[in-house]
Amino acid sequence: MLPNHARVGHKVAGCWILLCFLHINFCAGSSGKDSQGQDDLHAFHNNQLDLREIVFVIQSQRSSFHARRADRRRADLAEQARALAEEPPVVLLLHTLSDNEGDWSILPLLPHLSSSFGRNSSWIVFLEEETNVKMTKLVQVLGKFDKNKEWFLGKPLHDDESTIIHHYAFAENPSAFKYPDFAAAWALSLPLVVRLANKVRNEPLKSDFTIDLKHEVALYIWDNGKGPHLTAVPELCTAPQGSAPAQHCATTVGSELPACGEAVNTEDIFVAVKTCRKFHSERVPVIKKTWEKDALFLEYYSDYADPSIPTINLGVPNTERGHCGKTFAILQRFLSSAVPSTKWLLIVDDDTLISIPRLEVLLSCYDPSEPVCLGERYGYGLNQGGYSYITGGGGMVFSREAVVRLLNSGCKCYSNDAPDDMVLGMCLNALGLPVTHSPLFHQARPEDYAKALLAHQVPISFHKHWNIDPVAVFNKWLRDDLSARPSAGLNASTKTEL
């Protein structure tokens, strides 16, 4: 039997959330199990760890596309449990646990996980929506570790050089600190969860900004050497499902760009590039050499009208930082008759490198009639009732509906040099509109990310020209052979994501 809290449900933020597990018919030959299934059953039932001791937390999002993906992952876990003749484990969808905007940053969620599951569970396993799990293998792997001790398990990533996205931590030896690749799944033993939960309750979380969650969670757990390091688990993998390396893995991930049918048409995207006079000769030529040709509708917005580019002066003075006035002028122009009416708006900096064809593929998964705000998600003050926002350098994507709601709300800049992405985040939070995260958008350069992380991504954007050849970076990371694109799909297969 499941523990009472799992069978009945649990109460979070004043609401009852019923834990529903979807059952999908399982058939493998006349006996219901093939030889591999018999081996899995034998291995599973000889393991000392009970499946009901594992709580899965899928790091899901509110967007309809992401919610469907999370439901599919939950259904797969339930199906595997049924095939093993076991009751399903507790599977939580992170975006449904409460109304707290900061839940995606994990740490504020630990007290709830500790109080709800601390007595009957041994492991909290975190999955991303695209993380494939082989249940029998995962149970075997977790069974190797003493569940009564503190464990922090995952696939380790490390920095080759100190980086701004990690606040230049461990500058003398960046590779010494390991943090988990969330796509491979990561796990905390309950003794560690309980201790961390007490720490969160008793000591206010200090960080104002949430930038790279996996690194920041690892730093919090490590606690300047007082807590456990990340323990590397080779079976937690990011190898593609079905590949030869994946045979020994408990987890795998897809190595393709999410696609949901035909790519969005180029004429459905309007591109706004923020620039200024001093960068006309330095940054704009890079865009023209790389990705400008892939955009049908594109305008450069500056503090100076230069017909040779051409640029458009929106009447907003240039500012050294923030650019909020310019961004809101772009939003207003997008809804005016001055530009073609499109379903999507992409706002980028003049030093953003982006693949428009890949963006067209990704946008096939989102409904432009919904208020979609998509990009790389950062957080500000999430532990004190703050808000999420799309960081501007990696590119901010808005559906027309999102722009309409933003401007109709009366939200505006408190100054022209206010941080535009953060002001937009405050507006979206006030409206109750979700900020949708994609790890394929990048606020920094390829050099600022772990090589093992980028190895299983199909990146959409990078940002900044500092100390790199931006054209070479674009050609290496973002250029595609258009003749090889199936329906503009850029994937080895055209399997549709739910």
Image (cartoon, grey):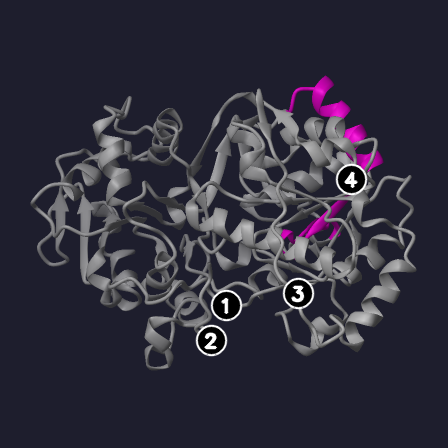
First in sequence: mark 3 vs mark 4: 4
N-terminal-most mark, 4 or 1: 4
Residue pointed to by mark 2:
493
Front in this rendered view, residue 410 or 3: 3
- Residue linked to disc 1: 256
In the foreground, 175 or 61: 61
Given the image, on which type of amino acid does mark 3 rest?
A: Phe
Image coordinates of residue 433 in percent, x first then y, are 38, 33
Mark number for residue 26? 3
Q: Is residue 227 above or below residue 272?
A: above
* Residue at image mark 4: 2
Closer to us: 175 or 96: 96
Which of pointers 2 and 1 lies earlier in the amino acid sequence? 1
Could you tell me which secondary element the residue under label 4 belongs to?
loop
The x and y percentages for residue 15 are 56, 24
Residue 299's label in the rendered image is: none
Q: Which residues are magenta?
A: 176-205
Q: Residue furthest top?
A: 202
Residue sitting at x 75%, y 47%: 187
Q: Residue at x 92, y 60 (%)?
A: 46
